[in-house]
Amino acid sequence: MKRALTSCMMSAALLAVEVLVGQGIARAQQDNGSIVGWGWNYNGQSNVPAPNTGFVAVAAGGFHNLGLKADGSIVAWGANEYGDCVVPAPNNGFVAMAAGNYHSLGLKADGSIVAWGDNYCEQCVVPGPNTKFVAVAAGTWHSLGLKADGSIVGWGQNNYGECNMPSPNMGFVAIAAGNRYSLALKGDGSIRAWGANDHAECNVPAPNTAFVAVSAGELHSLGLKADGSIVAWGQNNYGDCVVPAPNTGFAAVSAGYLHSLGLKADGSIVAWGNNSSGQCNVPAPNTRFVAVGAGTYHSLALVGLVSRRGDLNCDGYVNFDDINPFVKALIGQDAYETRYPGCSWLNADINADGYVDFDDINPFVACLVSAECP
């Protein structure tokens, strides 16, 4: 039977690791949760800040971007005229985010939403009670929040009814906010659309069934079907809605200003529509991507976060910075995953015996010294 770990044992573990390792630590970097950006870069929106590792999600806004780290913090870069990139303190505990034209939304693990940036239309004034949210979406001038009970809350500009939820406001599982309109996915696989419809961006093509994801662009919309195909509707001036053949094998979609991105299940990206700034020229090697984000004239993609024993803070290294996370993992799975929501607790099971316990300390030290784990 494995021993229960006491607070005294935790302190001893931390001391033991520090003494055994000292300062002689090798560093080994990997492509571990990095972000790739391409297209228009006038505001530096394609320049991902260093260290470009440990990301678990991306969001492309009009002229700025957000990246969610495995430790629950958000990194923001690009245009910052309205404080779009100034993440409010404390910058931790985030589990999701959304980037609008000039504003940003962050969803906390406790179900509350933090909003910052341009607030001209009160798109950053989250209605009360600010609790029990499970998803967020940021449009040009309005915001959406999905509640745990399947209802949607909208705030900000409402000149076109983009914040007037369809009735019955229930049973929703995903949301997307466009220029002056909104999309929501029902649990039955149908999509509801409301708001401005000048370009038929709210006219979901029949059959309106079997959808598993949605994305709202400036004036066009994308829906991902369960069979891996993409349906597109709305403005099509630049071929925004002409999905390249073969229209199969897609796992995620993102609609930008005048272009579209589709992520294939094999980790490659297909891009189509306006390419005036090279936003559809996916950089080589076009592989290992796990998420995409389409902005105004730029694009983002996330390289998969590789699960690696010993890398307890998921930054792509096995080094001294992993000691405190390792001790947190020894305390327990809940304590560790609360602090590092994007990382795997079992990365602390260094000796691969199925337990995270005192017996992992010496193997962990070996990992730190050599930067290699089993």
Image: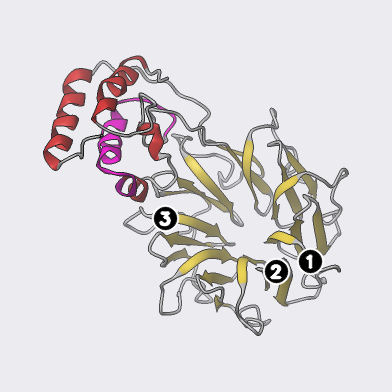
Can residue 260 be found in the magenta stretch?
no
Q: Do tag 2 and tag 1 residues touch (Cβ < 8 Å)?
A: yes
Residue 86 appears in the rendering: no
Front residue of this view, candidates 372 and 56: 372
Residue visible at 45% across and 66% down in the picture: 115
Whether residue 341 is visible, yes or no, is: yes
**Residue indicated by mark 3:** 94
In the displayed structure, 41 sits above or below 322; it is: below
332 falls in the magenta region: yes
For residue 188, the mark is 2
Real-space Cα separation, disc 1 to disc 3, in angstroms: 32 Å
| Mark 2 vs mark 3: in front | 2
Kindly identify the amino acid type of the residue bearing the numbered disc 2: Asp
Q: Quadrant of the N terminus?
A: top left
Task: Give the CA distance from mark 2 to mark 3.
Answer: 28 Å
Residue 51 position in % (x across, y down) = 44, 34
Give the CA separation, mark 2 to mark 1: 7 Å
Nearest to the observer: residue 132 or residue 317:
132
Amino acid under label 1?
Answer: Thr
Q: Which mark is residue 209?
A: 1
Label located before the other in sequence (2 or 3): 3
Label 3 is placed on what type of residue?
A: Phe
